[in-house]
Amino acid sequence: MGIFSDHDIVEGMMTGYLGISDYNEKSLTPNGYDLRISEISIRGKDEKFTEGVVRIPPRTMFYVSTIERVRLPSDACAQLWLRTSWIRKGVMGAFGKIDAGFEGTLTLGAYNATDDEIEIPIGERFCQMVFEGLNSKSIKDYAERSGNYQGQTGITLEPVKK
């Protein structure tokens, strides 16, 4: 099938094939969609930040949740790529693949690899989601196989489904 173009993404949303809640036209790219930050949590601290600018200390891991809620069909998956503007500031991302059939917000791991504090505004675009069509429909999609994080909202470090 290949990677979805901006045309494929918009058409997929219009027909209900793909789901991106809180869609923002500015986040659409030629071959993907930029996901925005809803919430940030700094590892080792209990506080979750949902507004303003978050200051990430040097050499610190943090978690990001997306504003957008994503819904994928059983014949498409998605890759996540940290936006290069964050890479240039010294942020490293730890992302997984979004499985066919997943629905929910995303929890993303990241690390400030610099010796300086980094400021990250809530609402900012953080990573690009690149959709890929599968050659055939999955026999069992994410919800049917493990579904550990199916339906998650906000930063979710423990499985939703137990």
Image (spheres, grey):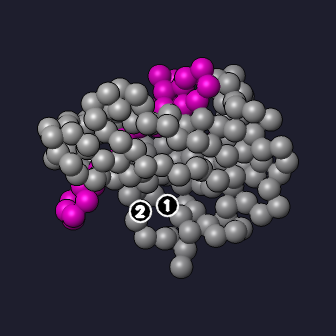
Q: Count the labels in the image.
A: 2
Residue extending farthest right: 136
Q: Which residues are magenta?
A: 19-47
Q: Residues within 10 Å of mark 2 (few under 14, many from 20)?
A: some
- Counting from the top left corner in percent of width and height, residue 72 is at 67, 48
Question: For the residue marked with disc 1, what is the amino acid?
Answer: Gln
Residue 152's disc number: 1
* Quadrant assignment for the N terminus: top right
Is residue 41 left or right of 71 when viewed as pictured?
left
State the residue at coordinates (65%, 37%): 131
Q: Which residue position holds label 2? A: 156
Is residue 36 left or right of 61 when viewed as pictured?
right
Kind of element beneath mark 1: loop
- Counting from the top left corner in percent of width and height, residue 43 is at 25, 59
C-alpha separation, residue under disc 1 versus residue under disc 2: 7 Å
- Counting from the top left corner in percent of width and height, residue 144 is at 71, 68
Is residue 79 left or right of 114 when viewed as pictured?
right
Quarter-of-image position of residue 122: top left
State the residue at coordinates (21%, 48%): 59
Regarding residue 53, the answer to whether it shows in the image is: no
Mark toward the viewer: 1 or 2: 2
Q: Assess whether residue 39 is covered by the magenta stretch.
A: yes
Quarter-of-image position of residue 44: bottom left
Residue 47's disc number: none
Cβ atoms under marks 1 and 2 closer than 8 Å: yes
- Counting from the top left corner in percent of width and height, residue 45 is at 19, 62
Kind of element beneath mark 2: loop
Regarding residue 46, the answer to whether it shows in the image is: yes
Is residue 121 left or right of 153 when viewed as pictured?
left
Question: For the residue marked with disc 2, what is the amino acid?
Answer: Thr
